[in-house]
Image: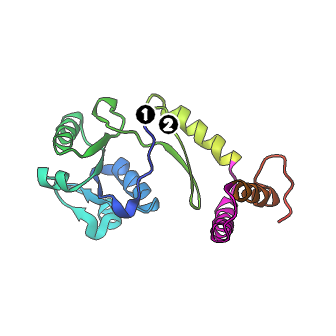
Amino acid sequence: MIPITLAPAQTDIAVIGKGPLALRRFRQLRDLGGDPLLFCETPDADLANEAGARLRRRHPSRKDLRDLQVVWVAGLDEAQSAEIAADARAEKTLVNVEDVLAFCDFHTPAIVRRGDLLLTASTGGASPAAARFARETLEAAFPEGWDEALVELADARRRARANGVAPAAISAEAQAILARRGLIPGAPSTH
């Protein structure tokens, strides 16, 4: 596996499918900052309402797939999923078919988000349950509060770099900020 983080503003993405799996994936991508299209021939009310103007009431054409960079397929039968995966690959579009490893160019990891801090766990699709356990462990290890800490760390780093502070000193200051906030195990919070 090659881990990458996609910039949602620069990545054309879509969900292709129907039902609760497609709705969950669509919401997840939106929550992560994406603006996905949703291709669904017969959307239920929840999908239609959630997607709004981003809904396309059809399966994607080859041109649609060519114009996208990454697609997630969810809630379709294996034959439909196989056809869409083959078409996407032919157009050089990365594809993930929910729970069908043979049709996946990539896997979506379990995610913990604390502001701009993004932590992920993946088993390469081998065990979603193990990835979920790893995510829960990360949630406990990285409690709420990291979002505010990252804002402070970014400001401190910007100021230090503008003043020509050495990288080692910037790192030490970051560690001190995290310790003061009680975000480093064993360090008392003074915040």
Q: Nearer the viewer, mark 2 or mark 1?
A: 1
Which stretch appears magenta?
142-167
| 90 with respect to 100 (left or right) | left
Q: Position of residue 119 (x, y in %)?
A: 57, 48
How would you rate the neighbour count of disc 1 (Cα within 10 Å): few for under 14, some for 14-19, many for 20 or more?
few
Could you tell me which residue is drawn at 44 percent across and 32 percent down?
Answer: 124
Q: Looking at this view, name the residue that lies furthest to the left.
A: 62
Measured as percent of width and height from the top left, residue 111 is found at 53, 48
Of 141 and 166, nearer the camera is 166
Residue 98 among those drawn in magenta: no
Mark 2 and mark 1: span between their CA atoms? 9 Å
- Kindly identify which numbered label has been placed on residue 1: 1
Label 2: state its secondary structure: loop
Horizontal side of residue 163 vs 22, given as left or right: right
Mark 2–mark 1 contact, CB under 8 Å? yes
151 in magenta: yes
User: Label 2 crowding class (10 Å Cα cut-off): few <14, some 14-19, many 20+?
Assistant: many
The residue labelled by disc 2 is 122
Measuring from the top left, give residue 150's x and y in whole percent: 65, 62
* Image coords of residue 11 (percent x, y): 33, 58
Name the image quarter holding the N terminus: top left
Is 121 or 78 nearer to us in this picture? 121
Name the colour scheme: rainbow
Q: Secondary structure at mark 1?
A: loop
Q: Nearer the viewer, residue 142 or 128?
A: 142
Residue type, mark 1 in image: Met
Residue type, numbered disc 2: Ser
